[in-house]
Amino acid sequence: HFTLGGRLSPDITPKELFVTACVIDISDRAAANPDAEVTVADLRGFERSRGRIPRGAGVFMYSGWESRVNDPDAYRNLGPDGLFHFPGFGIDAVEWLLENRDITGIGVDTLSLDNGPSQTFAVHTTLLGADRYGLENLANLSTIPPRGAEAVVGLVPWEEGSGGPCRVLARW
């Protein structure tokens, strides 16, 4: 999945499927700008108010986009420019997390780790190229505390699978 020779889903270890969840809320910004991205400033702001993102964490973006899930057109948000418009992670934020926090992965409540109009998929290639994983279409992130939850990723380890469905459960 975006990484030639990268690990397949059966290669992800059980330890990697249990993560401390850190939920970064960009819903106010996403309501005003569907192309909003998680930024390094968002991550630093989270840490100022919630404490340091722990090593091995799953860092999840809450944009409020899940409210559109029952309307496929609104969820994809295809613009007159022929591009999708929905929030995602910015490449600078992902690079910062990889260099400074040794995360296990990231997750989003949208269709893609990259924001909708991305044509380069830099977040995908950087994150997956660093041997981390990404979770898309997460639900109910608004119900999870920004910090203090543990998440379990119920991965289907499809042979030769580089991506696929999973169920993510959190408790706190």
Image (cartoon, helix red, strand yellow):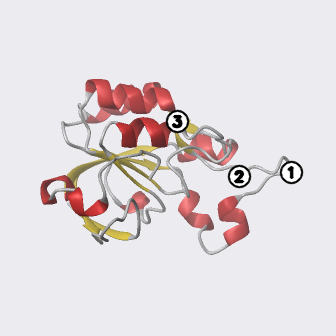
Q: What residue type is labelled 1?
A: Pro
> In what element is the residue under mark 1?
loop
**Quarter of the rendering containing residue 118:** top right
Identify which residue is drawn at 62% across, 75% down.
Answer: 70
Q: In this view, does 68 lie to the left or right of 57?
A: right
Instruction: Pinpoint residue 83: horizontal percent, then vertical percent.
Output: 75, 49
Q: Distance between the residues labelled 1 and 2?
A: 9 Å
Q: How far apart are marks 3 and 2 (CA)?
A: 16 Å
* First of labels 1, 3 by sequence position: 1
> In what element is the residue under mark 3?
helix
Identify the mark at residue 80; answer none if there is no mark: 1
Identify which residue is drawn at 48% across, 38% down.
Answer: 123
Identify the mark at residue 122; answer none if there is no mark: 3
Q: Nearer the viewer, residue 161 or 108?
A: 161
The residue at the far front in this view is 5
Instruction: Pinpoint residue 31: horizontal percent, then vertical percent.
Output: 65, 48
Q: In this view, does 65 lie to the left or right of 131?
A: right
Q: How many marks?
A: 3
Identify which residue is drawn at 46% across, 58% down.
Answer: 136
**Mark 1 closeness class: few <14, some 14–19, many ≥20 residues within 10 Å:** few
> Which residue matches tag 2?
84
The residue at the far right in this view is 80
Could one spot residue 39 in this view of the protein? Answer: no
Q: In this view, does 108 lie above or below 94?
A: below
